[in-house]
Image (cartoon, helix red, strand yellow):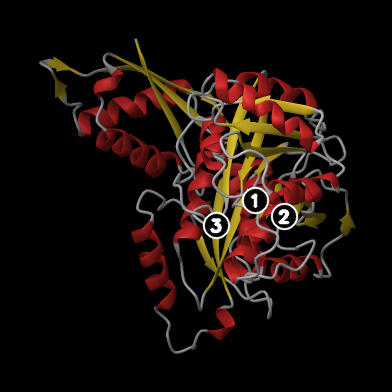
Amino acid sequence: MSLTISIVGRPNVGKSTLFNRLIGRRKAIVHDVYGVTRDRHYGESFWNGKNFNVIDTGGYLSKEDDVITTGIREQVHIAIDESDVILFVVDTETGITSDDKDVTVLLRQQKKPVLLVVNKCDNEEKLLQSYEFYGLGFEHVFPVSAISGTGTGELLDKVVQLLPEEEIENEEPGYPKIAFVGRPNVGKSSLMNALLKSERCIVTDIPGTTRDAINSLLEYKDEYFILVDTAGLRKKAKVKENIEFYSTVRTDRSIKEADVVVLLLDAMQGFDEQDKRILREAEKFNKGIIIALNKWDLVPEKNTNLLKEFEEYIYGKVQTLHYIPIVSISALTGQRIDKVLDISKEVIAERKKKIATSELNDFIAQILKERALPVKRGHHLKIQYAVQVKSNPPVFKFFMNNPQELPPNYRRFIENKIRERFGFYGVPITMVFRQK
């Protein structure tokens, strides 16, 4: 189970500034204009031994009904629904407003812990003004300055105290997990249903530790897999961007818990920035990756070169991810859907591959002869030793002089050569360079 906190409140109280403070980097746009935070802002934080997700939301206004405000309001409801702890942010400079009271009414309906965060307490005078907010009736009140970080340590101490213990995933057998991810309406549920309806498959519904993900156990060619569908929504969102917001929150969780991530694309819609973000996220967490072009039945049969053109286009967009296999399928007709499982099996095996140290060092010696290491600051760079320190996912460690001087293009050369020789099909490779 992924632990999550959400940051809510009316506009311009400093929610995004607090979000950036909690995740430790500037990710959310901070500006004193209402509506800047409209889309999803989703990050990770770590405090006192606990990892948890942080969701930033737009400013909540209960009385306005334009499409943007309605969309933001829906996102706030979704974020609250997903949370284990809620941070309600207010502004000590303006005092209690009617909008603060509206948010208070909303949060009192939740059966989740709420911490009232009084922001902009930058000096003693503003700290004294913060006591007014005890009038909202919340048990836990924390005066902070999101800009300077004052008071955020005490706030995080309480957050960690209130977060539930992470569930040990003993409810599910230790079979490989294949997560189907992608934009809304690309056919994730259709593909999963098509796979599960196969007469060759023994299907058992099992409880999922990822909230709301639909996990099913499937037997395929004498092996078991857990299929994770992230497509279903608990409630209808009124605005399209909220569906994408909710989809993103759940996609990130599913990626972290999967062994193989299958990114579904609609062959009639193409590849966009959101798809690229999903690939980068899967690569960051070292997951096996496959791209499936769905709805291939709609592609004219005479266009035989379209798959190759698609591959060239996608690889052109993500030039460092040429190792990712691409397969064309149709969840509707069943065309090549078994290929997704066959490739998943290959990728899982590649992820577990272990290269013997002697074989690896002989190989490194060969490629160093093929392309000599550069000279930096008058010194010849040298790799003395290499070892694969981990598999599933694969991690390689290289011991050398002056590793900080090794240029990125040579690192890429080493990775490409490793792939040429040893494979690692569909699997990110981590390479660590250390001082000998």
Q: Marks 2 and 3: which is nearer the front?
A: 3
Residue 53 appears left or right of 170:
left
Q: Nearer the viewer, residue 324 or 358?
A: 324
**Pair 1/3: label in front:** 3
Residue at the (49%, 75%) spot, across then down:
269
Query: In which quadrant of the rendered view does residue 169 lie?
Result: top right
- The amino acid type of the residue labelled 1 equals Val
Q: Earlier in the sequence, mark 1 or mark 3?
A: 3
Residue that mark 1 sits on: 249
Q: Residues within 10 Å of mark 2 (few under 14, many from 20)?
A: many
CA–CA distance between discs 1 and 3? Answer: 15 Å
Residue hosting label 3: 38
Amino acid carrying mark 3 in the image: Arg
| Distance from Cα at disc 1 to Cα at disc 2 | 10 Å
Q: Are marks 1 and 2 in contact (CB under 8 Å)?
A: yes
Which structural element holds mark 1?
helix
Say which mark, if any, is on residue 78: 2
Question: Residue shown at 34%/10% (left/top)?
Answer: 436
Horizontal side of residue 255 vs 141, given as left or right: left
The total of numbered circles placed on residues is 3
Mark earlier in primary sequence (1, 2): 2
